[in-house]
Image (cartoon, rainbow, N blue to C red):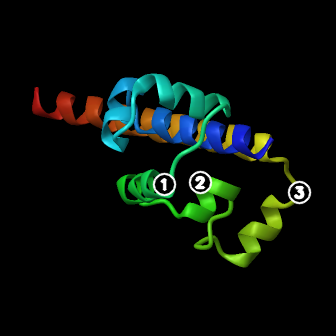
């Protein structure tokens, strides 16, 4: 179960970075096929590759391994404790999509100003 959760977090990190499986695997120094195993929870990263992932993404090992970010204020952790990991991840994906929408809208309006 834990390996599947870690794999899902790693997959979501890759998707949030808009990287293909092959490109992300290359950055980690593993094959795309092995990354697929990891993302499905059928494989795991070595400590060295975990460190590479942390350095690449600027995320803590606590977050990657356990879904816990030590930089989150206690009051936010308390608020989020009411929700399942799946609900929190869906909220994060929604927020990420909203940020992309805002950036895209901002770029469109900047281009209109230039034209």
* Mark drawn on residue 73: none
- Circle nearer the N terminus (1, 2): 1
Residue placed at 62% from the left, 72% from the top? 70
Looking at the image, do the residues carrying marks 1 and 2 touch, with CB atoms under 8 Å apart?
Answer: yes
Quadrant position of the N terminus in the picture: top right
Pointer 2 residue? 64
Estimate the spatial distance between the alpha carbons at disc 1 and disc 2, rounded to whole Å: 8 Å
Residue 40 coordinates in the image, percent (x, y): 65, 28
Looking at the image, do the residues carrying marks 3 and 1 touch, with CB atoms under 8 Å apart?
Answer: no
Report the side of 104 relative to 110 (left or right). Answer: right
Number of marks: 3
Residue 37 coordinates in the image, percent (x, y): 58, 28
Residue placed at 63% from the left, 44% from the top? 92
In what element is the residue under mark 3?
Answer: loop
- Circle nearer the N terminus (3, 1): 1
- Circle nearer the N terminus (3, 2): 2
Rate crowding at label 1 as few (under 14), some (14 to 19) or many (20 or more) other CA atoms within 10 Å. some
Please say whether residue 85 is visible from this viewpoint: yes
Pointer 1 residue? 50
Residue 36 coordinates in the image, percent (x, y): 54, 25
In what element is the residue under mark 1?
Answer: helix
Estimate the spatial distance between the alpha carbons at disc 3 and disc 2, rounded to whole Å: 21 Å
Q: Is residue 10 above or below residue 42?
A: below
Residue depth check, mark 3 versus mark 1: number of the one nearer the observer: 1
In what element is the residue under mark 2?
Answer: helix
Pointer 3 residue? 82
């Amino acid at each position: 179960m834990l390996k599947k959760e870690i794999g899902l977090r790693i997959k979501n990190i890759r998707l949030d970075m808009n990287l293909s499986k092959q490109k992300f695997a290359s950055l980690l120094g593993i094959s795309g096929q092995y990354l697929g195993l990891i993302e499905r929870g059928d494989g795991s990263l070595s400590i060295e590759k975990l460190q590479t992932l942390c350095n690449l993404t600027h995320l803590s090992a606590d977050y990657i391994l356990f879904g816990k970010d030590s930089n989150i204020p206690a009051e936010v952790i308390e608020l989020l404790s009411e929700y399942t990991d799946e609900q929190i991840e869906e909220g994060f994906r929604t927020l990420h999509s909203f940020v992309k929408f805002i950036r895209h809208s901002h770029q469109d309006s900047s281009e209109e100003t230039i034209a």
